[in-house]
Image (cartoon, rainbow, N blue to C red):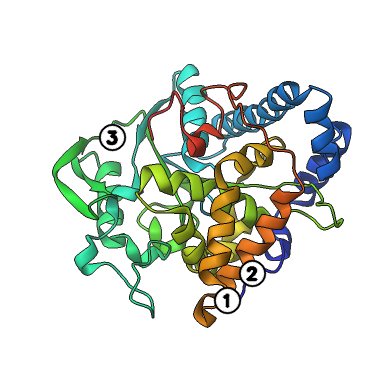
Amino acid sequence: MNTDNSNNEFKKNIPMQVIEGTQRWYVEHGVDTIQGLNNRIADGTFPELVEESNKRYEWYTELAAQTILDYDDPVRLVIVAGPSSSGKTTTTNKIAERLRAKNLKLIPMVLDNYFFNLDVHPKDEYGDYDFETPQALDLPLINRHLSDLLAGKEIQMPIYDFKSGLRQEETVPLHLNDDEIILIDSLHGLFGPMTESVPRENKFKLYIETLSQMKDINGEWTRWTDIRLLRRMIRDSWHRSYSPVDTIGHWHYVRKSEMAYIVPFITETDFVVNGALAYELPIHKKYSFNSLKEAMDKYESDPGKRDAYLRAERVYRLLDGITVVEDDSCVPKKALLREFIGGSDYDY
């Protein structure tokens, strides 16, 4: 079943002022359409668009950090949540930098390290490993570790290697002092059982999504999930040894999990960050255009992968109307996009 038919399921749970503000920004910067984006490339102002887009994203992270500082209750846990490839890790890093600059002490806790080993990992109906469900994570261990940290105890955080699909023998000792805050980023950070051992009044929940407000050559809104798919196609290829074509074939699991474990809980967030970058599609074309064609060829005659074929075809048509940008050197080393295309100053 194709659950990827619109932005509406996400959009109805996003504060309207966030959407309207984003629409105004795209219009003011001449990139509310693909043609406008192409014009920014043709007139030589693409580097300026990169700077303008990054500045807006940085503004979100700065405001988020200040909101945490102004929170009424004592925050012991900051959660950066959002769907796949929305930019959670970079956002977590940037908020951590800003809070530390205000002398707030933070303890990062990487929940990706709590995936089960592949021999006990959940599988789907086709026998593929499902990394998109919360049940792929050791929820009891996460909650026990959170509880122990808040109680002043030291924990041994596991280290998960995605290339081998195994937790390593080595662990990372973590201890939380009274004046420190746990900081995590997680696909399913909004899912209640993920952090149920921490009282709600001591949690600050931040949600990030690629809230693009750009229309394609047919006047249709560019789909947020398609932007995230393009990001993940690149990242999976260098971070998880997963081919871009396989990422497309797997994406329906991502969407199924988002609809079940993310969308219903968006309204419970304390802050929303827009992780969309108005300049990224021309750069994605350089990295992913050929892979989309390969996916179309691979999945066209496979009835079980009809969803993957339709998705690849749609995104291929989207990029086909965009002028490619081959040189991405204008993208700063600490830009969110570097989380996906590589070359970041951050350690992922």
Q: Residue sitting at 24 percent across and 38 percent down?
A: 152
Q: Quadrant of the C terminus?
A: top left
Residue 238: in sight, yes or no? yes
- Farthest left residue in view: 169
Q: Is residue 206 visible?
A: no
The residue labelled by disc 3 is 176
Residue 60: mark in rendering:
none
Residue at horizontal 59 percent and vertical 66 percent from the top: 264
The residue labelled by disc 1 is 306
- Give coordinates of residue 191: x percent, y percent: 47, 61
Confirm or deny contact between disc 1 and disc 2 (CB under 8 A). yes
Kind of element beneath mark 2: helix
Q: Where residue 117 appears, x then y in whole percent?
A: 22, 60
Q: CA distance from mark 3 to mark 1?
A: 48 Å
Q: Residues within 10 Å of mark 1 (few under 14, many from 20)?
A: some
Position of 177 with respect to 191 (left or right) is left
Image height of 261 relative to 242, above or below: below
The residue nearer to you, when weighing 255 against 342, is 342
Rendered residue at 38%/75% (across/down): 124
* Nearest the eye: 210 or 142: 210
In the drawing, does residue 207 fall left or right of residue 165? right
Position in image of residue 189 (x %, y %) = 46, 53
Secondary structure under the numbered disc 1 in the rendered image: helix
x, y (%) of residue 90?
A: 49, 34
* Residue at which label 2 appears: 310
**266 left or right of 322 in image:** left
